[in-house]
């Protein structure tokens, strides 16, 4: 196929990568989070007497398992801080605040959290702070909404309020209805700029064409293009139109429904070697029962009105491709 000329304007778009991370809790973390729900902060004591807050299950120095839980105060001393003038989505406060490391009374290590303060001039190392509790608590670090300035002790002193433990107090770690697992959403928001090669690739997709770039050395055509040959390491500039049909080289059956994805399970996700390409791309296979998808199946793209990329690929009705014709692209 002949090279394609023309360079579109540079593209950029917001991109979000997000997934929920679910984990079970061991006895130490379970006690810590359940304690927060009950407005109790727990640490763990190591063999040499240090109290770690937040608690860990293994001594960071000796690697020995530790389960000696103790209660510490909800007041403490700022050990270091940084001002955050423009809070982002999901951060503890929606107004400017300070990130602080606070050593709670009775602890030997510092806890990272937010401090609600009037401004950076109101924050300093050594200042006394106390926890501000959420009205409704569920057993999470956010049960402490933030810390706030506290006048209950002079700078650098560790004297807590009269109702706070001055020294770590042994605690069984037992609570009614303990928290045994958490789901922590992981999310990354950023602006993605695809660059010259992928901008041209995306512009072609908007015209329902698929283009790759040919390496001037090995002559392989890569789809999607990256601007350089991964084998030879040289720049690729000549664009080549490939497909639209291709061959399934390998595939998997998806049985878990993804959040916000309107596709019923099970469905098939496959690597497809488009005709004329030397690298397989991945896409969903439709128009055929999931258990009839196979290696070598010939497929073609299906576009939806207004879409900038194929919705899925479906069988063409052609005979399956011979294994030798795609074995190098598996």
Image (cartoon, rainbow, N blue to C red):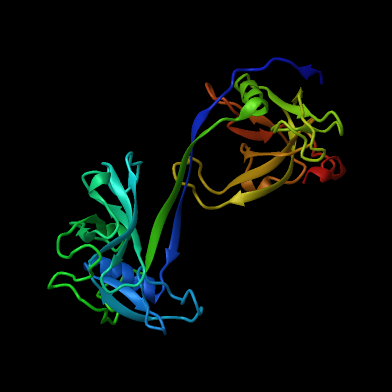
Give the left or right position of residue 189, taking residue 237 as reference.
left
111 or 22: which is nearer to us? 111
Direction from residue 90 to residue 277 in the image, left or right: right
**Outermost residue, bottom direction?**
47
Which residue shows up at 40% across the image and 58% down it? 183
282 and 111: which one is in front?
Answer: 111
Residue 113 in percent (x, y) is at 32, 56
Q: Count numbered badges in the picture.
A: 0
Quadrant assignment, res 301: top right
Say which residue appears at 33% left-offset and 44% top-offset: 84
Percent from the top left, x then y, of residue 80?
A: 35, 57
Rendered view: 235 above or below 186? above
Residue shown at 24%/58% (left/top)? 127
Relative depth, front residue between 329 and 51: 51
* Residue farthest left in this picture: 162
x and y percent of residue 321 in the render? 81, 39
Which of 320 and 136 lies nearest the eye of the viewer?
A: 136
Q: Quadrant of the N terminus?
A: top right
Q: Can residue 133 be seen in this view?
A: yes
Q: Residue furthest top?
A: 6
Whether residue 222 is situated above or below residue 77 in the rendered picture: above
x, y percentage for residue 249? 75, 44
Examine the rendering and report whether any part of residue 243 can be seen.
no
> Relative to residue 229, is residue 152 depicted above or below?
below
Q: Is residue 178 left or right of residue 227?
A: left
């Amino acid at each position: 196929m002949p090279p394609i000329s023309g360079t579109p304007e540079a593209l950029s778009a917001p991109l979000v990568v997000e997934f929920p991370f679910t984990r079970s809790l061991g006895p130490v973390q379970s006690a810590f989070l359940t304690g927060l729900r009950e407005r109790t902060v727990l640490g763990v004591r190591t063999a040499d007497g240090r109290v770690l807050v937040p608690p860990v299950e293994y001594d960071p120095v000796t690697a020995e398992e530790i389960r000696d839980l103790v209660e510490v105060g909800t007041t403490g001393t700022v050990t270091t801080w940084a001002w955050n003038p423009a809070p982002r989505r999901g951060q503890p406060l929606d107004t400017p605040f300070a990130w602080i490391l606070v050593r709670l009374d009775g602890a030997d290590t510092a806890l990272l959290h937010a401090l609600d303060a009037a401004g950076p001039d109101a924050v300093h190392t050594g200042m006394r702070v106390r926890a501000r509790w959420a009205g409704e608590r569920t057993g999470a670090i956010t049960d402490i909404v933030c810390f706030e300035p506290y006048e209950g002790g002079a700078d650098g002193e560790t004297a807590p309020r009269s109702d706070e433990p001055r020294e770590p107090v042994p605690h069984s770690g037992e609570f009614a209805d303990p928290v045994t697992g958490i789901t922590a959403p992981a999310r990354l928001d950023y602006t993605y700029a695809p660059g010259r090669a992928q901008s041209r690739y995306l512009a072609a997709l908007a015209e329902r064409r698929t283009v790759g770039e040919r390496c001037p050395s090995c002559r392989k055509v890569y789809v999607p293009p990256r601007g350089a040959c991964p084998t030879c390491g040289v720049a690729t500039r000549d664009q080549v139109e490939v497909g639209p049909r291709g061959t399934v080289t390998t595939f998997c059956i998806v049985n878990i429904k993804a959040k916000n994805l309107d596709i019923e399970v099970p469905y098939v996700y496959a690597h497809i070697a488009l005709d004329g390409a030397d690298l397989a791309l991945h896409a969903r296979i439709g128009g055929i029962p999931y258990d009839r998808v196979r290696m070598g199946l010939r497929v073609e793209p299906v576009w939806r009105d207004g879409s900038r990329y194929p919705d899925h690929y479906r069988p063409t009705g052609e005979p399956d491709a011979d294994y030798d014709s795609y074995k190098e692209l598996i």
